[in-house]
Each structure stands twice: as structure tokens, then as C-alpha cells.
Image (cartoon, rainbow, N blue to C red):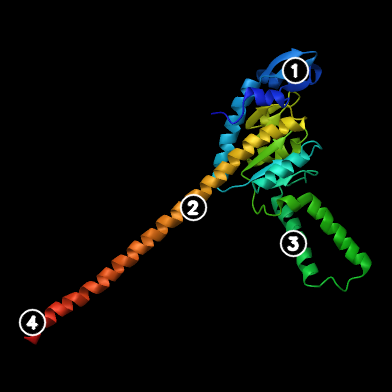
Amino acid sequence: MSRTNFETLLEAGCHFGHLKRKWNPAMAPYIFMEKNGIHILDLHKTVVKIDEAAEALKNIAKSGRKILFVATKKQAKPVIAEKATSINMPYVIERWPGGMLTNFATIRKAVKKMANIDKLTADGTYANLSKREALQISRQRAKLEKNLGSVADLTRLPAALFVVDVLKEQIAVREANRLGIPVFGIVDTNSNPENVDFVIPANDDASKSIEVILNACCEAISEGLEERKAERVDAEAAEEKTEKGNSKSARVEDEEPAEAEEAVEAPAAE
């Protein structure tokens, strides 16, 4: 069963592309028709592509790896922040930090710097600083939080990138391509789908369109996380059962020699 349907996507305006003069010919396979100079996307293909992307995202989440969500355009920011937070995944909604992926070690140093500032503030180390120095540190902390706060828990490179508007986030896409990190993207008619591993052809400008697609994908990720959790519980239960079985066997082995000694001692008493 599909995670979404034609009617839902149609109602959300997922089918509206850009003006014909702005199109990227590589998107031709996903375009249904042209109406009033605007390209209309084939939503039947969009439904299929959402299902493919959702299944792949579910498997990644089930494996315990992270998916980094990226959307710096105004209408996508709140949706991305809400959905990514709900499934405990990192996201970038401010300016993409150059080298976020290709120079990940430097990004981690900046995150550690932010954590260090918090630690020194908490233990009173900065209490004796002048107002000017305290203000500078506070501003530095706020800047780091704004740009990197949402990726503070990302201790290693993400297993995948989910991008809203691959044209706007082309630097992020290039970095992922360079490192072999699979890219999932909502791709409009003015974008190039060739550098995207899982193309979701749809309107990447309307917040409703973005939201309905993210709902389907995040639901799949949530399922993957739940399945991983269930498997871990089953594994722990099986391990505990095995340990109890081994413990019981050990007790039986300890008792058997004692019984044998009693049987040997009995005739001697006669």
C-alpha cells in the first residue's frame, strides 16, 4: 500500500512546476503536460518515487544511522525543523556551512567549542570576565547555536541527505556526491535530478507540498526506528534467556557430583 496517493498530492499542489522557460530538460520524464506556460508534474510517478524513497529511508533508520535534513528556504524551514526533531534526526535550516560534510572534523571542533563554552559558563569560569568579553563569548555561542545547534548530536557523517530544493542546496548535494552519501531530494522542474539518488518530483516551493512529502518519509523513518527498537528488545530477551539457561545448567552440574558422592558413601557405612 502506498504511503500517499494522487488525491492527497494534488490537493497539496505537488503537481505545480515552474514556467516552461525555466525548466531543466532532464526533468522531462517526470512532466505530465504544460498548462498556461507552466509545467505540470506527473503525480502518479511522484507517488511511486515517494514510496521508493520512504522504504530506503526506513532501512537506513532501522540500521541505526542518521539522516541529515537540509532546507534553507523560508517556507521549508519550520516544516523541516518540526519533522526532523520529531524523529530525532539532525537538520540544517540556516546557511549551509561550507565543508559540513567534506570537512566534517572542523565542524565537530566548532560543536565541541560550543559545548566547552556551556561548560565553562556553568562552572563559573566566565563569571569574572568583563562585560565586553562576556558579550563577545555570548554572541559567539549564539552564532554557533544558530548554525550548528541542530547537528550537535551528529558525531559522524550522516548515512544520507534529504534535501528540499536541490537547486538551492547544490553545495550540500555536491559534498554528498563527493563522499558517496546517497541524496534524497524533492526535485522541481527547474532542477537537475542527475545528482540525486532518490528523486521525488514535486513542487518544492509550496509549504503544503513539502509537508505532505515529509509526512510520508518521516513516518517511514519512524517505523524503521520502532522496528530497530523492537529487535533490540527481542535480542536482549533472547540473551537473558540464554544466560538463565546456562546458569541453570551450571547449577545442575554442580549438584550431580554431590549426589554421586552420597551414593558412594552409603555402602561404606554398612
Residue 89, above or below 236: above
Image location (x, y in percent) of residue 233: 48, 53
Q: Amino acid at mark 1?
A: His
Amino acid of disc 3: Ala
The residue lying furthest to the bottom in this view is 269
Residue under numbered circle 2: 232
Q: Position of residue 232 (x, y in %)?
A: 49, 52
Q: For the residues marked 3 and 1, what is the alpha-carbon distance in whole angstroms? A: 48 Å
**Residue placed under numbered mark 4 in the picture:** 267
* Element under disc 4: helix
Instruction: In this rendered view, identify the residue nearer to me: 54 or 137.
Output: 54
Residue 39, which numbered label?
1
Using the numbered discs, state the Cα–Cα distance from disc 4 to disc 1 in whole angstroms: 101 Å
What kind of element bears circle 2?
A: helix
Question: Secondary structure under badge 3?
Answer: helix
| 221 relative to 44, above or below | below
Inter-mark Cα distance, 2 to 1: 47 Å
Residue sitting at the far left: 270
Quadrant housing the C terminus = bottom left
Lower position in the chain sequence, tag 2 or tag 1: 1
Residue 51 seen from this side? yes
> Label 2 to label 3, Cα distance in Å?
31 Å
Q: Are the residues flagged by discs 3 and 1 in contact, CB closer than 8 Å?
A: no
- For marks 4 and 2 on the same chain, the one whose residue lies earlier in the sequence: 2
